[in-house]
Image: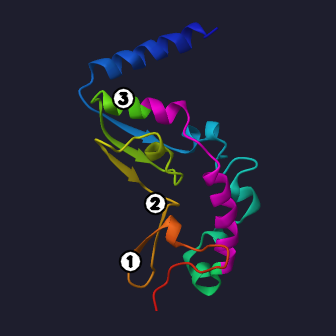
Amino acid sequence: MIGINLHKLILKATDIIKYSKKIVVFTGAGSSTESGIADFRSKGGLWSRYDPSIYANYHYFLQDPGKFCKMNNELVNILLNSKSNLIHYAVANLEKLGKIDAVITQNIDALHKAADSGETTLIYELHGSYKKLECINCKKQFEFEEIETNNVKYPVCE
C-alpha cells in the first residue's frame, strides 16, 4: 500500500500534468535503472570498474582509443540488451496526449526513442547517444550499425 504522503504527491503531480499546457521532461540515470542499466556512479556502475578520468577522457582517448573501446563495448552490450520501461512509456504516452513539449535526457541509452518518444517532440540527449558517433576530425556522423567497435575501428576519417 502506498503511504499517504506519497499518495498525496502522486495526486499533486497528476493535477500539475492534467492542468499544464506543456511540460518539459528531464530524465537521468534513475529512469533507466529499471531497464537494467546501473547508474554510472552507483555501486556496480561503470565508474566503479573504469576510472572516468582515464576511460572517459578525451586526451587519453586520442593517445589510446583502446581503453575507451573496451569500456564502451561493455556498456554497449548492456544497452543492446535493455528495454524501455514504464517511465519511458509514460513519457511517450504523455507526448501522444500533446502534453510534452520536449524531453531532455542525460542518458545515452536511446530508450525514450525505443518507447516511441520523439515522434511529435524533440528529444535532447545531453551526452549524446550510443547509437551515433562523430568523427573527431571532420564531424561526420556515423550510425551505430556502421561502427565496428570490437576491432577498435572507431570513426576517424583519413
Residue occupying the point 45% across, 79% down: 135
Q: Which residue is mark 1?
A: 140
Residue 8 showing in the rendered view = yes
Task: For the N terminus, give its image quadrant.
Answer: top right
Q: Secondary structure at mark 2?
A: loop
**Residue 79, how many percent across, how many down?**
61, 53
Q: Which residue is mark 2?
A: 128
The answer to the question of whether label 2 and label 3 lie on touching residues, with beta carbons closer than 8 A, is: no
Q: Earlier in the sequence, mark 2 or mark 1?
A: 2
Q: Earlier in the sequence, mark 3 or mark 1?
A: 3
Q: Which residue is mark 3?
A: 94
Q: What colouring method underlies this structural image? A: rainbow
User: Closest to the observer: 65 or 113?
Assistant: 113
User: Closest to the observer: 120 or 65?
Assistant: 120
The region drawn magenta spans 66-90
Residue occupying the point 65% across, 49% down: 81
